[in-house]
């Protein structure tokens, strides 16, 4: 989704929505989040990427650890990919971590280690979409441009009683334009910081998806959805994505090693579920796993309890199968690109969260 670019100043739109939001944010918005006191594009960018599809409470655990290891864009760019993925493990949406690493490298190699100062240029970097670029530009450089993430779409669609289907790209373009029309007409000082944070805070704490707190909303009397008692109708999304069920059988192939044991892992393909992470070999059926194991080792297979794991559009059932055996347990190593990892080295390997829990529990 591309942002519409600069727009001319307006009178503020929707009867001064912007100035009311700025005042409310300064008085009642969130002010204790660790990334809020910084105008460093690196720190703001990192927080924005982590917060995509992830609860603030979760990011509060990861953000300081990530900064402690990678305090600036150059240290992140120079880090091994496996280390970046290992620190990201558990946050999900792992393409964000791959793009984060790649973006850091581009900033260092193509921009001398300094982030571009405008939303249009920021959006050309790997993994930075229109709304994230707008957030960085507004927070760090005071650019007069609106964000439009999922929470903000909900706030503005209710405010305007926007009845078009937001699953359609044309409707999204209309909302981008309307979002720009609602901006503060002549922002000064940190107005754009307060306005942008106010949009986030309103969507996260008041104008929530279910059971919105309309009585606490600073723009309740401007909200057309509230005026018509139709808050639950918005935003309108006509197309829903069906959740799929996926069953995987994981071969936890373990062998003795000095001081403990090693586990055979392989890197997942560059696309698809858990792309680029390390994982035990995956099979699509119990029979396929059995057939991969040499006949004389099959009676050593141990079926562990099934693990349920939810992704955005999938419900996964993981069937872990433990095999204690040497390198001859699979014919020709199963034709797989193995990496034998000691138990005490797992913390430094990029692993999917449910797999990490399985391996640490062995």
Image (cartoon, rainbow, N blue to C red):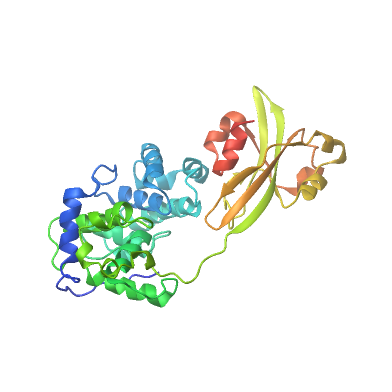
Q: Quadrant of the C terminus?
A: top right
In-image side of 195 versus 268 (left or right): left
Q: Residue furthest bottom?
A: 170
- Toward the top, the furthest residue is 259
**Percent coordinates x, y for residue 89 in the rendering:** 50, 43
Q: Examine the rendering and report whether any part of residue 221 can be seen.
A: yes
Q: Residue at x 39, y 38 (%)?
A: 61
Seen as rendered, the residue at the extreme front is 229
**Residue under the point 47% across and 72% down:** 238
Total numbered labels placed on residues in the image: 0
Relative to residue 342, is residue 117 drawn left or right? left
Rendered location of residue 208, percent (x, y): 34, 56
Tell whether 12 sits left or right of 304.
left
In which image quadrant can residue 11 be found?
bottom left
Q: Position of residue 188 (x, y in %)?
A: 12, 60
Location of residue 265 by image quarter: top right
User: Residue 76, image x and y in percent?
Assistant: 41, 45
Horizontal side of 285 relative to 209 (left or right) equals right
> Between residues 51 and 45, which one lies in front from this camera angle?
51
Residue drawn at x 50%, y 43% is: 90
Q: Say if residue 116 shows up in the picture.
A: no
In front here: 293 or 234?
234
Q: In the rendered view of the protein, which quadrant contains the N terminus?
A: bottom left
């Amino acid at each position: 989704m591309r942002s519409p670019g600069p727009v001319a100043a307006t009178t503020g739109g929707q009867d001064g929505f912007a100035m009311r939001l700025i005042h409310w944010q300064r008085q009642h918005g969130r002010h204790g989040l660790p990334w809020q006191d910084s105008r460093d594009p690196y720190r703001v960018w990192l927080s924005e990427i982590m917060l995509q599809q992830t609860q603030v409470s979760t990011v509060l655990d990861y953000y300081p650890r990530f900064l402690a290891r990678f305090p600036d864009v150059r240290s992140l760019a120079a880090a091994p990919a496996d280390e970046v993925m290992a620190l990201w493990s558990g946050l999900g949406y792992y393409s964000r971590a791959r793009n984060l690493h790649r973006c850091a490298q581009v900033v260092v190699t193509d921009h001398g280690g300094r982030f571009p100062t405008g939303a249009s240029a920021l959006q050309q970097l790997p993994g930075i979409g229109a709304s994230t670029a707008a957030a960085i530009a507004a927070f760090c450089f005071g650019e007069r441009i609106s964000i439009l993430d999922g929470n903000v779409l909900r706030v503005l669609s209710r405010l305007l009683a926007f009845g078009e289907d937001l699953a359609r790209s044309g409707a999204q373009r209309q909302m981008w334009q309307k979002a720009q029309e609602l901006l503060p007409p002549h922002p000064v000082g940190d107005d754009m910081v307060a306005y942008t944070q106010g949009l986030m805070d309103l969507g996260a704490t008041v104008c929530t998806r279910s059971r919105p707190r309309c009585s606490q909303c600073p723009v309740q009397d401007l909200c057309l959805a509230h005026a018509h008692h139709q808050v639950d109708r918005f935003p309108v999304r006509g197309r829903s994505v069906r959740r799929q069920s996926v069953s995987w059988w994981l071969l936890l192939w373990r062998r003795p090693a000095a001081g403990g044991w090693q586990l055979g892992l392989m890197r997942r393909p560059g696309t698809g579920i858990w792309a680029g992470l390390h994982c035990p070999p995956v099979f699509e059926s119990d029979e396929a796993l059995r057939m991969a194991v040499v006949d004389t080792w099959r009676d050593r297979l141990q079926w562990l309890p099934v693990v349920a794991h939810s992704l955005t559009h999938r419900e996964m059932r993981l069937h872990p199968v433990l095999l204690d055996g040497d390198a001859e347990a699979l014919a020709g190593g199963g034709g797989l690109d193995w990496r034998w990892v000691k138990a005490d080295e797992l913390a430094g390997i990029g692993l999917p969260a449910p797999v990490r829990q399985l391996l640490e529990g062995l």
